[in-house]
Amino acid sequence: MAETPFSPESPFSPEPPLSPEGQENGLPSQPWPADAAEATPDPVTPETEPILAGPDPEADPADAPVSAPEPGIVATFEVPPLEGSADPTSEGGGEFDLLLQKIKDWLSSGELQAQWQRFRGPLKGLAILIGVVLLLRIYASLIGTLDSLPLVGGLLELAGLIAVSRFTVTRLVRKSDREQVFADWSRRWNDFRGRE
């Protein structure tokens, strides 16, 4: 912002000069001029600052020098249509036909079957693991729900104790019964593992 020099005749000076009759009477003069022509200040012309850098706003963009494009990554590219495509004169580059052909070649090469054979064992193991985790989560939530009911937890513990004691008395006291129980358990384990 530019400063204006102080002039005593300026109507906006900090201390207006006293008029002669006001000085005689001891009265201060009016803080504003009496004439309207004296009240209008001279227009202030702003100083223009030089532009240090940047494009000239008044210059024509068509006159600007055109530089060669820099090498870089191509944003778009066109794929020519395939030789055996239905309509080679149609608009487009044949990308979809090219993609379909690559998928058909990959499926017919037999690589999908080889990858399935290679990953079948781990995928089967992963599926079994996920199934066991889900089953245990459902079992734990069911047991938690039953345990939150009054008297149900105690009654289930009593029923389990009665079943274990009955099985022990009827099947594990005599040696012949124990051998039969162990043989039955080993047969079931071998059937589960797929062995004879």
Image (tube, grey):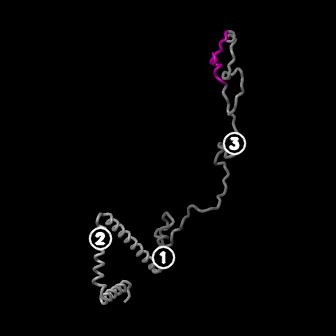
x%, y% of residue 23?
69, 12
Quick one: 24 or 87, which is closer to the camera?
A: 24
x%, y% of residue 194?
38, 86
Secondary element at tag 1: helix
Q: What residue does disc 3 label?
A: 51
Amino acid type of the residue that numbered disc 2 sits on in the rendered structure: Leu
Could you tell whether 191 is left or right of 17 in the image? left
- Check if residue 35 falls in the magenta segment: yes
- Check if residue 38 falls in the magenta segment: yes
Vertical order, 88 against 165 (above or below): above
Give the magenta-colored segment's residue range. Answer: 25-41
Residue 57 found in image quarter: top right
Amino acid type of the residue that numbered disc 3 sits on in the rendered structure: Ile
Q: Residue at x 56, y 64 (%)?
A: 77
Q: What residue does disc 1 label?
A: 106
Cβ atoms under marks 3 and 1 closer than 8 Å: no
Q: What residue does disc 2 label?
A: 156
Viewer-nearest of discs 2 and 1: 2
Helix, strand or loop for the magenta stretch, by majority: loop
Distance between mark 2 and mark 1 Cα atoms: 59 Å
Number of the label disc, if any, that sits on residue 22: none
The quarter of the image holding the C terminus is: bottom left
Could you tell whether 33 is left or right of 126 in the image? right
Could you tell whether 5 is left or right of 31 in the image? right
